[in-house]
């Protein structure tokens, strides 16, 4: 019985001891929890301070950026619109200088070529009229006198003292088939009948003094020519071949002379 009571007392004592330890640990834990809870506002306050400081720093940086932004942007924007336009104009001028120089060279070469061609044409007896001509317009006779044409072909002509002294002006057709621009200038020769002509037995050939066929008396003028040269003899002529600039065709007008005498023919050629 005594042992039972001692056992119960021992159990009760252990229970009380265990309870005190448990209550003390609980109180300590509760106190620690309260301390942690009290510390949280402090931490929150610190976080708010940090956040406020961050906002202030961001605001400062933003203000500094806004203050420095326009200046920095102005420096990085490059040349102004006016400067860009002036630069473009200068580059365009430089680009145009070379073609202008080349065009000037081509013009100089063309002028030299034209001058050379005109001089060569004058040497060959071309008659240039208008503002571009150097001397005043000369007559065909004056050109003949200056060039001292060879009239030896007149020695081979037949002269008829019984024929009336007469001259008449006619055209030449067919120049484009027998002549070029190199044949332009004063011409002398003979107009002679060509009965063997397969196209027209009435044909009157116009032959230069060197024997070159220039063309024919036009068919529209044959009746007129036959009335003029009733004896159908070979007649000398004098005239000039020209280039018609309006039509770019060769044209010629000749004075045909009845060979009544050598003196009369020479006088009409050189008149």
Image (cartoon, grey):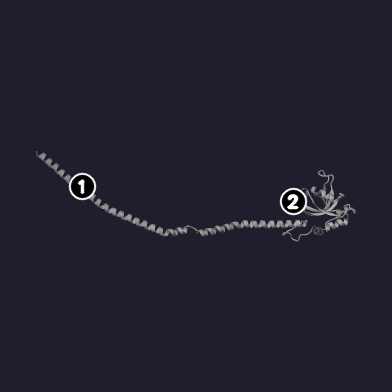
Residue 187: percent from left, percent from top: 81, 54
The quarter of the picture where the C terminus appears is: bottom right
Work out which quarter of the rendered image holds the N terminus and state it. Answer: top left
Q: In terms of secondary structure, where does tag 1 sit? A: helix
Q: Nearer the viewer, residue 188 or 14?
A: 188
Asked whether residue 262 is in view, the answer is yes
Q: Position of residue 139 (x, y in %)?
A: 79, 59
61 vs 166, nearest the viewer = 166
* Residue ID for mark 2: 249
Q: Which residue is mark 1?
A: 26
Secondary structure of the residue carrying tag 2 is: strand
**Number of numbered labels in the structure image:** 2
Residue 155, quarter of the rendered image = bottom right
Horizontal side of 43 relative to 95 (left or right) equals left
Front one among 193 and 24? 193
Picture residue at 46% right of the left edge, 59% below the top: 74
Question: Which percent across, then down, holds residue 233?
Answer: 87, 50
| Crowd rating for badge 2 (residues with CA inside 10 Å; few <14, some 14–19, many 20+) | few
């Amino acid at each position: 019985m005594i042992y039972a009571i001692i056992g119960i007392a021992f159990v009760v004592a252990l229970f009380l001891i265990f309870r005190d330890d448990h209550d003390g640990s609980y109180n300590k834990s509760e106190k620690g929890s309260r301390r942690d809870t009290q510390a949280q506002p402090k931490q929150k306050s610190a976080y708010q301070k940090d956040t406020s400081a961050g906002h202030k720093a961001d605001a400062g940086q933003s203000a500094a950026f806004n203050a420095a932004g326009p200046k920095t942007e102005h420096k990085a924007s490059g040349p102004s619109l006016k400067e860009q336009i002036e630069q473009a104009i200068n580059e365009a001028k430089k680009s145009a200088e070379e073609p202008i120089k080349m065009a000037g060279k081509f013009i100089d070469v063309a002028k030299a070529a034209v001058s050379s061609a005109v001089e060569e044409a004058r040497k060959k007896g071309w008659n240039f009229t208008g503002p571009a001509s150097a001397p005043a317009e000369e007559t065909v006779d004056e050109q003949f006198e200056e060039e001292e044409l060879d009239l030896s072909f007149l020695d081979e002509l037949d002269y008829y003292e019984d024929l009336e002294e007469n001259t008449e002006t006619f055209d030449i057709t067919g120049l484009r088939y027998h002549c070029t621009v190199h044949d332009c200038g004063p011409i002398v020769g003979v107009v002679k009948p060509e009965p063997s002509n397969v196209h027209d037995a009435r044909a009157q050939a116009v032959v230069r003094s060197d024997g070159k066929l220039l063309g024919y008396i036009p068919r529209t003028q044959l009746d007129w020519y036959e009335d003029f040269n009733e004896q159908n003899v070979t007649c000398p002529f004098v005239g000039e071949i020209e280039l018609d600039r309006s039509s770019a065709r060769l044209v010629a007008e000749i004075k045909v002379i009845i060979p009544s005498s050598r003196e009369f023919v020479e006088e009409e050629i050189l008149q």
